[in-house]
Structures are given as C-alpha cells and as structure tokens.
Amino acid sequence: MALAAPAVRADDPCLGDDEKKSALAQSSALAKAEQAGRPAALFVAYMKVAANDCIDRYDKNAMGNAKANMPKLGRDLAKTAETKGALYSAEPVRADGQTSAFQYFEAIGDHPEANRVLTKAVQAKPDDLHLFEAAWNIDNGRYGPVDPNTGSRQPYISPPVFRQELTKVASANADRLMKAEEKDAKGLTGNIGELGKASLQSIEKLRSASLWMKFLPGGDKPAKDRAEQRGDTIMKRPDPTFTQGQAMMYYEFSGSPKANDMASQIKKKGEESQRTMEKAGEGMKKSFSQKSEAEQIQFDKKKADLEKELGF
C-alpha cells in the first residue's frame, strides 16, 4: 500500500479531515481484506474504494487495484451464487457472501448478465408478482458506463428482448387465472351457498388477472369486461333481493359506464329498502308503545277499582 501526501489545493474538497479519515480507513480496510483472502469481503472493500473520489489523494494504488480486480472477482462470486440458486435479491452486496448473483453483476455494471439471472429468477417463480414488478422496473436508477469524453453517464435501457420475456410470464399468469375463473363462475347460477363461495373465488381471480394484465399491451380490459358479465349473470337470478350484493362487487371492480350505472342502481335500491325497513321498525315500535301505554292505563284503573272495593 503506497500512501502519499495530498496535493495542496485550496478548492480541493478532499482536503477535509473527514474525507482524509474516510479515505485512509478504506485504504486500510482494503489492505486487510486482500491479506485475509475472503473474496466476498474483498469485493465489498473494492466497492467502497471505487466509490471514494478522494482515495487517490492518499493511496495511489487502491483505486487502480479496485477497478482492475472488481470485474473478474464480481463475476466469479456471481457464478458461485448462481450455482447455489441465489439468483436475485433486493438486498445489497454483503461482506459475508450472502449476496445474489444479480447484485454482483449490478455492482460491476454488467447489466446484461444481471438481466439474465433476474429473468431466470422470475421464470423459476412465475407467480411471484412482487419479484416480477422488481424485474419490470429494474432499469429505474440504472446508468451505463461513464463517457470518457464528457464524464457523464446515460440512463441504461434494457434491450427489448428482456421485456418480451417478462411479458410472456405475465401473459401466462393472466391466461391461467382467467381459465380458473371460468370454473368458479359456474357456481354463480347455483344456490345461495354456492353463489357466495363461487363469487368470492371468481372475483379474486379476476383481480389477480387484472394485476398481471396491466403489464400487457392490451391492459386489464378483458378482466374488467368479464367482471361486468358476471354481474349481469347474477342480476338475472330469480332472487335478486338476496344476491345483488355479489353483483355489485363485480360491477364496482369492472368500472365501466354500464357497470357503474348498475352499481348505482343497486346502491339506491338498497338505501330505499333500508329506509323502508327503518320506517316499518319505527311503526312497530310506536304500535307496541301505544299498546303498552293503553294496557298500563287499564291496569291502573282496575287496580284503583279493586282498592276502592276493598276499602283502601
């Protein structure tokens, strides 16, 4: 490790005590990591050195060593992680080696290889929507290499084939859910018990299919249209008083002009029925109250007559 005194420049941001302390600490950590022979810890030390713009002022060799050795070490560590099945994780690179192949490739700027293992991870868990969304939005915050002429970095955009592979996964999930929903929907014409179970299972699959369809060119219109159809099926039943709630559930999810109108009508009828029941309840309560009052008066009169007869 070669240490050198910093060049004297009044406007040099690296001359601060904190910057000097940080640079020397990372230089020392790198030397220890190189001697320890632990690849994962050494890689982390390289990363920290590469991210320190001031280290060249205090250690002339550290930055060069990091830039020269990081790519190969990163690929070796990524290969080991991939062999173990650690394809993707949102967790950053760790010194203990518990790091995914994706993160190693990202750390060395090898986005194509990072995309490859990420695609592999998605295909291994095709129904994991959270993982899929992470893959779909992976280019957010990504940048390409530094332009030697301008010193700037352009945002990195994955090649079309990457999104195409993800689209296949989304399409397969949407198709699977829509087919499964067809089986559930058969219970919508059954008895009340069957309807309750079938409608909950059906709407759940339509909602899930909708989430996957949002990544497809046509969007989630097929799921929304089918929800409207399911609502119409329920409204044709001979027992609408007891089943309109299930129909409204479909209409609200559909969100089409017709579905919104149907949902509004159902809600209005429900409110009218509620008011009618409340009025009927108030009438019965009043009737009971009046009857009770009349009975009390009659009882008091009989009591008074009896007391008079007995001479009280």
Image (cartoon, rainbow, N blue to C red):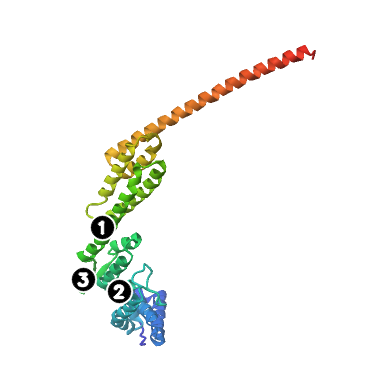
Residue at mark 3 to residue at mark 1: CA–CA distance: 42 Å
Q: Which residue is mark 2?
A: 105
Q: Nearer the viewer, residue 14 or 221?
A: 221
Q: Amino acid at mark 3?
A: Thr
In the depicted structure, whether residue 249 falls above or below residue 85: above
In the depicted structure, whether residue 35 falls above or below residue 49: below
**Taking 67 as reference, is 279 left or right?**
right
Asked whether residue 140 is in view, the answer is: no
Residue at mark 2 to residue at mark 1: CA–CA distance: 28 Å
Q: Amino acid at mark 1?
A: Ser
Q: Which residue is mark 3?
A: 150
Q: Earlier in the sequence, mark 3 or mark 1?
A: 3
The location of residue 265, given as percent across then percent down, is 34, 33
Label 3, secondary structure: give it: loop
Q: Which residue is mark 1?
A: 171
Closer to viewer: mark 2 or mark 3 = 2
Closer to viewer: mark 3 or mark 1 = 1
Closer to viewer: mark 2 or mark 1 = 1
Q: Amino acid at mark 2?
A: Phe
